[in-house]
Image: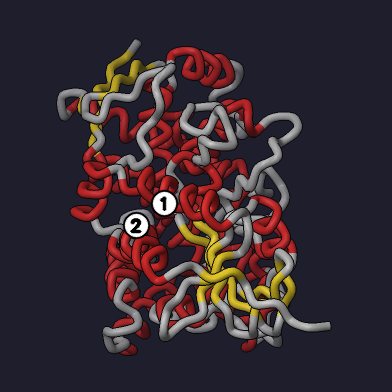
């Protein structure tokens, strides 16, 4: 059978796509967000521009895999919901998660992490991740001690905010969130070890420049050694305890799976803070959250209203704005043949906020996450066999931490942009400059 090449964008359309899609994605920081760029992105509503740019391409070329006319890399943009599911359902073969770009970036802090593993090592590392993180279970088997840590830090945060005059900002919130993350992942003894997460942040910042900046092996070794010290302690009630008890060998590279969890928890913090903005400005949804908190605030629970609110935060403002896959062989998609080594680009914001196809695209709509899912490519944690292994744990921890923060408190947004029910939500929301006024009810 003759192979059919993908439809290819014209040179002007490729240039416009690079300007409206690729450059903003890179500029904001693929591995760790750049705060100043995030502020500019909100000001120009960068993701709204991205969505409109891809809508124009779809109107011009149709809902087909669209190749960009670039000299150094074969890149195909997906413009159809069905193609998104076909690619993600066929990951990691023939659509590998270990793209050239990911390898260059993630090798800075997890050289043998599952996301950049080859076909020989990936299955065992994926097994290990799923076993430790209890993938597919809404409540981790250590939900009790995890919930206790999250509630304790939420109460401490409320006390700290009250002492500071009732204003909650990003630095205060993220410091408390990472105390939860370190306790849950590494144990209570790591609660105040900001150095371990600061080292990771430095490596992630360098990973933003992975294709041009030289690696820092000494810094990588320093970070992994410090991480290993906490893991070797295997403190009861932490993921470190589960790591120690889960079968692994040298090829599993158990220690190097943990940085990805810390990385993901950073993105979870961004989503949790944006969730506060949504709930603080949408009284009906806040009432549903308060009702479920009142049912049992001290007991580990699934908290469906809060989980749905967090999922909506990730849908509206994806923490992984681009999902990348690389073909491992010539592959048929959308009636065309993608050559081996093609980078397949899925822009989450486009599919999540496509107002031409979905009336709810720009609304806070938690009901999307209950009952029958809509016929759309909603992939806040990716999808298919390579779906984020920590999705359930992230949703449990963020919802539990927010429940502890909201319990008995009034929360009001004290910063711009103002969010309002019944008005389209901004395409881009910078979490780093959000502020909230919090006071006892």
Position of residue 250 in the picture relative to residue 277 (left or right): right
Indicate how the structure is coloured in the image.
Answer: secondary structure
Residue at position x 43%, y 43% from top? Answer: 317
Q: Position of residue 414 (x, y in %)?
A: 22, 24
Who is closer to the viewer here, 150 or 384? 384
Q: Secondary structure at mark 2?
A: helix
Query: Does residue 422 show up?
Result: yes
**Residue located beneath label 2 in the image:** 20
Disc 1 packing (10 Å; few <14; some 14–19; many ≥20): some
Q: Position of residue 221 (x, y in %)?
A: 37, 85
Instruction: Name the N-terminal-most of marks 1 and 2.
Output: 2
Residue at position x 35%, y 10% from top? Answer: 441
The reply to whether callout 1 and callout 2 are in contact (CB within 8 Å) is yes
**Residue located beneath label 1 in the image:** 53
Choose top left, top right, bottom left or bottom right for residue 360. Answer: top right
Residue at position x 25%, y 35% from top? Answer: 434
Marking on residue 38: none
Residue at position x 58%, y 71% from top? Answer: 325
Q: Position of residue 139 (x, y in %)?
A: 67, 43
Q: Secondary structure at mark 1?
A: helix
Who is closer to the viewer here, 397 or 87? 87
Q: How many marks?
A: 2
Choose top left, top right, bottom left or bottom right for residue 69. Answer: bottom left
Quarter of the rendering occupied by the N terminus: bottom right
Q: Position of residue 294 (x, y in %)?
A: 55, 16
Which residue sits furthest left? 165
Who is closer to the viewer here, 201 or 285? 285
Query: Does residue 183 show up?
Result: no
Q: Is residue 138 above or below residue 87?
A: above
Q: Is residue 409 above or below residue 330?
A: above
């Amino acid at each position: 059978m003759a192979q059919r090449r993908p439809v290819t964008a014209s040179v002007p359309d490729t240039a416009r796509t690079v300007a409206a899609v690729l450059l903003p994605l890179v500029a904001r920081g693929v591995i760790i967000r750049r705060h100043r760029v995030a502020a500019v992105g909100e000001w120009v509503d960068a993701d709204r521009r991205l969505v409109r740019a891809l809508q124009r391409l779809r109107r011009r070329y149709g809902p087909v895999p669209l190749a960009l006319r670039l000299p150094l890399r074969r890149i195909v943009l997906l413009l159809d919901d069905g193609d998104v599911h076909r690619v993600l359902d066929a990951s990691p073969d023939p659509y590998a998660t270990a793209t050239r770009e990911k390898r260059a970036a993630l090798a800075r802090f997890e050289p043998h992490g599952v996301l950049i593993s080859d076909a020989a090592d990936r299955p065992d590392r994926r097994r290990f991740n799923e076993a430790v993180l209890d993938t597919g279970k809404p409540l981790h088997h250590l939900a009790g001690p995890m919930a206790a840590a999250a509630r304790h830090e939420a109460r401490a945060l409320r006390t700290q905010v009250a002492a500071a005059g009732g204003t909650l900002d990003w630095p205060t919130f993220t410091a408390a969130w990472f105390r939860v993350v370190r306790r849950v992942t590494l144990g209570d003894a790591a609660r105040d070890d900001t150095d371990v997460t600061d080292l990771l942040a430095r490596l992630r910042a360098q990973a933003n420049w992975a294709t041009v900046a030289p690696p820092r092996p000494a810094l990588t070794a320093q970070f992994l050694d410090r991480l290993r010290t906490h893991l070797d302690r295997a403190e009861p009630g932490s993921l470190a305890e589960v790591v120690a008890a889960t079968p692994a060998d040298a090829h599993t590279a158990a220690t190097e799976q943990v940085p990805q969890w810390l990385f993901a928890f950073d993105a979870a913090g961004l989503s949790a803070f944006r969730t506060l903005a949504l709930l603080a400005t949408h009284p009906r949804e806040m009432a549903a959250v308060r009702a479920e908190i009142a049912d049992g605030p001290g007991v580990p629970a699934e908290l469906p209203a809060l989980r749905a609110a967090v999922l909506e935060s990730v849908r509206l403002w994806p923490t992984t704005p681009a999902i990348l896959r690389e073909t491992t062989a010539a592959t048929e998609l959308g009636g065309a043949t993608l050559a081996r080594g093609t980078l397949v680009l899925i822009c989450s914001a486009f599919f999540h906020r496509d107002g031409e196809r979905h009336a709810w695209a720009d609304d806070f709509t938690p009901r999307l996450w209950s009952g029958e899912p809509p016929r759309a490519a909603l992939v806040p944690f990716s999808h298919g066999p390579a779906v984020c292994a920590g999705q359930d744990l992230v949703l449990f921890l963020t919802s539990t931490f927010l429940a502890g923060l909201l319990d008995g408190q009034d929360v009001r947004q004290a910063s711009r942009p103002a969010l309002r029910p019944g008005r389209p939500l901004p395409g881009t929301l910078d979490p780093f400059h959000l502020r909230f006024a919090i006071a006892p009810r």
